[in-house]
Image (cartoon, coloured by chain):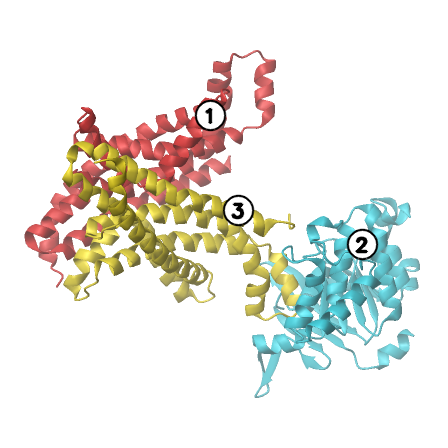
Chain colours: A red, B yellow, C cyan
């Protein structure tokens, strides 16, 4: 049933596909880091309309499947005249989807900064911009670093969904190997093992980072 | 063709989405408690076994698990119909996350509660059932609510193993008129939101009701 | 009074009880008898092992060595073919029926109202019919002055009220030995009096033996038949309240008492 020679034979191909998976993860994460921060600011904005709209976007994006969001970007946008290659659509979809999650993470970080810090910044006559960049954000981001790290792993594990918009990442590669040889067992098991090894190792790293951050 | 022409087949798909969500949620709920208590067991072998289950299902991706059950498992002689593969993958995957919720909630009940229950001579089962669980359960609700939304969203993946859920119906409609793709999938998103939002509100309400008078 | 009790069979008997955590010795070779209906106060500095004494009897912690007997029966052990083996949960369950405990931090069940806090164990542990359990509970809650709070939840009560509920909850089980583990230490000073008054009242009535672990020296003197001073995991001195408070023998007890009179001064304040 299980053939080791075959497993060894397909391993290099899967390992090559890991690169696409990781590239999509990192690009999507970078997008989500920025998008999440912008949404978090919008959520705190003074005009009620802006803050409500941001809350609505966050709630809507979080409550609907990434897969369908990807379909909108990849299959839907061309009818509006915008055609994106699979990688770009995938990264954009991942980035938007997780912006909504990270917005909430940023929010909790910002809210954890004591009121006195704002007051001290005002008392020292910092401008609004300086208050954010020099006083608030540095304190808000430090405690959420492990949470952000965990979301990086979550996003990594979501990337197989990108195969549905024809991106040839690890799962798609495994599926193509499987359908060509009818040996799905080795292909999917190896893909699963690669996901496990990478995500488990990263989660151990993040746990260490977390205990280091809380030590101080 | 107007927007309303899309509704009948989307409604059919939504019905399957709801069905799979409910079935998987039941599996996930049972797995959460079994594995959550398994990790708290006094026996090392039980703890180790459940830890492996939890780490494997959390460490690999849901879609990989789904494909593995659907495509790879038959080669080991176990052929699952798509619906069963979908419900098992969704249930066990979210059950692994849920077990952490159960475990941490049980551990979060103060030690003094167990001690008071011992001092009143309750049996271990009574301690759990009458003192620990009612308090732990309230703490689990917000996380379970979030997991349920994740589960509902996760059901969209079963469209990739031929099940005609909401997402699948969207794909089918698109083949009739590709120029309306944007409109179709936007509508699909709205339907998902309409399914998820009441869950969010319901969970918030449940939490309020259960904590009423106690805090 | 003391002497007549010494002759009766003790209801609790600690024999060479030791408790260690790793390198740390909490209790060292303790021997202690408590007679039926006897009120024993245990005083001593923090970390002297006095709380552990009660927790071992309540089966919250297991002794490292030694035995405890309750009513002449081994608590933590069973005799199998002449050898002592650790008792199973069933045996512990049977033995616990004799013992009740009130905790420093109350440990009321926050998800139950006051009446249910007090009826839960009578119904489900003793198997009493609901009406009887409620009757018992209401009588007891009235006795501790909380007959009007039956429907309230613990979070709505003051510390003193919570502790009185906890006392009622333990009493309805009708134990033969009651353990009070620093029951006023977590209370605001102005609430201490109401709780001590309730305990004094119970002690006056009582056929029940009591072990009172406390920092309230006046209270210990008023209520106890016998006072035990523990320090460093051993019983350093014991005797009647008069002996202990007015004629302490060991330097350690003398130092402890003088610190109490001069220092944090609960003794001085009243």
Corner quadrant of residue C84: bottom right
Whether residue C49 is visible, yes or no, is: no
Query: Which label sits on residue C59?
Result: none
Q: Is residue C236 left or right of residue B30?
A: right
- Residue A152: which quarter of the image? top left
Image height check: is C86 above or below B213?
Answer: below
Q: Residue at x 27, y 50 (%)?
A: B12
In depth, the one of A206 and C43 nearer the eye is: A206
Question: Which residue is nearer to you in this view: A179 or B114?
Answer: A179
The picture quadrant where one finds residue A54 is top left
Name the residue rendered at 25%, 33% in the picture.
B183
* Chain label for disc 3: B
Q: Secondary structure at mark 2?
A: loop
Horizontal and vertical percent position of residue C158 = 76, 49
**Parent chain of label 2:** C
Left or right of B99: which side holds C247?
A: right
Q: Is residue B58 above or below residue C213?
A: above
Quadrant occupied by the N terminus of chain C: bottom right
Residue found at x 57% / y 52%: B210
Q: CA distance from mark 2 to mark 1?
A: 56 Å
Q: A88 or A155: which is nearer to us? A: A88
Give a yes or no on whether discs 3 and 2 share a subunit.
Answer: no
B166 versus A80 height, above or below: below
Contact, CB < 8 Å: mark 3 with mark 1? no
Which residue in the structure is indicated by mark 1?
A51
Which residue position is annotated with label 2?
Answer: C215
Mark-to-mark CA distance, 3 and 1: 23 Å
- Locate residue C83, reporting x and y percent: 58, 84
In the image, which disc is placed on residue B205? 3
């Amino acid at each position: 049933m299980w053939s080791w020679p075959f497993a060894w034979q397909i391993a290099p191909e899967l390992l090559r596909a890991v690169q696409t998976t990781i590239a999509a993860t990192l690009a999507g994460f970078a997008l989500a880091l920025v998008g999440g921060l912008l949404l978090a600011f919008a959520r705190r904005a003074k005009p009620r309309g802006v803050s409500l709209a941001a809350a609505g976007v966050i709630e809507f994006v979080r409550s609907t499947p990434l897969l369908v969001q990807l379909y909108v970007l990849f299959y839907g946008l061309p009818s509006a005249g915008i055609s994106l290659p699979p990688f770009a659509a995938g990264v954009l979809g991942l980035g938007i989807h997780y912006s909504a999650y990270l917005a909430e993470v940023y929010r909790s970080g910002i809210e954890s900064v004591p009121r006195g810090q704002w007051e001290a910044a005002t008392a020292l006559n910092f401008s609004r911009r300086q208050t954010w960049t020099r006083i608030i954000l540095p304190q808000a981001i430090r405690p959420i670093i492990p949470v952000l790290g965990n979301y990086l792993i979550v996003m990594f594990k979501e990337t197989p969904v990108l195969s549905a918009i024809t991106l040839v990442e690890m799962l798609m590669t495994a599926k193509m190997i499987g359908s060509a040889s009818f040996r799905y067992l080795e292909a999917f098991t190896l893909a699963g093992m690669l996901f496990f090894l990478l995500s488990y190792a990263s989660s151990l790293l993040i746990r260490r980072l977390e205990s280091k951050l809380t030590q101080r | 063709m107007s927007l309303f022409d899309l509704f009948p087949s989307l409604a059919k798909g939504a019905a399957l989405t709801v069905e799979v969500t409910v079935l998987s949620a039941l599996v996930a709920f049972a797995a959460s408690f079994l594995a959550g208590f398994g990790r708290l067991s006094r026996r090392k072998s039980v703890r180790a076994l459940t830890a492996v289950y939890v780490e494997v299902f959390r460490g690999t991706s849901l879609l990989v698990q789904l494909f593995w059950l659907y495509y790879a498992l038959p080669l080991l002689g176990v052929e699952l119909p798509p619906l069963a593969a979908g419900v098992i993958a969704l249930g066990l995957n979210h059950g692994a996350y849920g077990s952490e919720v159960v475990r941490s909630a049980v551990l979060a009940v103060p030690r003094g509660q167990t001690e008071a229950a011992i001092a009143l001579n309750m049996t271990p089962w009574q301690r759990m059932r009458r003192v620990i669980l009612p308090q732990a359960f309230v703490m689990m609700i917000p996380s379970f609510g979030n997991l349920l939304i994740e589960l509902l969203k996760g059901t969209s993946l079963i469209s990739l193993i031929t099940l005609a859920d909401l997402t699948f119906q969207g794909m089918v409609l698109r083949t009739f008129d590709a120029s309306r793709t944007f409109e179709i999938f936007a509508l699909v998103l709205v339907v998902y939101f309409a399914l998820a939002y009441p869950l969010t509100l319901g969970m918030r309400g449940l939490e309020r009701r259960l904590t009423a008078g106690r805090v | 009074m003391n002497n007549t009790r010494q002759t009766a069979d003790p209801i609790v008997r600690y024999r060479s009880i030791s408790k260690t955590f790793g390198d740390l010795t909490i209790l060292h070779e303790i021997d202690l008898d408590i007679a039926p209906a006897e009120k024993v106060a245990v005083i001593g500095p923090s970390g002297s092992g006095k709380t552990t004494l009660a927790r071992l009897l309540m089966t919250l912690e297991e002794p490292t060595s030694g035995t405890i007997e309750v009513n002449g029966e081994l608590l933590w052990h069973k005799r199998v073919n002449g050898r002592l083996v650790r008792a199973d949960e069933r045996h512990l369950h049977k033995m616990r029926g004799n013992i009740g405990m009130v905790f420093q931090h109350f440990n009321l069940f926050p998800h139950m109202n006051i009446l249910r806090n007090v009826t839960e164990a009578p119904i489900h542990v003793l198997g009493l019919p609901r009406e009887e359990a409620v009757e018992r509970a209401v009588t007891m809650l009235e006795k501790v002055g909380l007959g009007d709070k039956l429907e309230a939840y613990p979070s709505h009560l003051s510390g003193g009220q919570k502790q009185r509920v906890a006392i009622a909850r333990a009493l309805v089980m009708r134990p033969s030995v009651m353990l009070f583990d620093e029951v006023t230490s977590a209370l605001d000073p102005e609430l201490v009096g109401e709780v001590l008054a309730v305990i004094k009242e119970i002690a006056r009535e009582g056929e029940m033996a009591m072990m009172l672990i406390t920092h309230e020296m006046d209270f210990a003197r008023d209520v106890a038949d016998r006072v035990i001073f523990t320090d460093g995991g051993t019983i350093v001195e014991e005797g009647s309240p008069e002996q202990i408070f007015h004629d302490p023998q060991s330097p350690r007890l003398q130092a402890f008492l003088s610190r109490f009179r001069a220092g944090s001064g609960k003794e001085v304040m009243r």
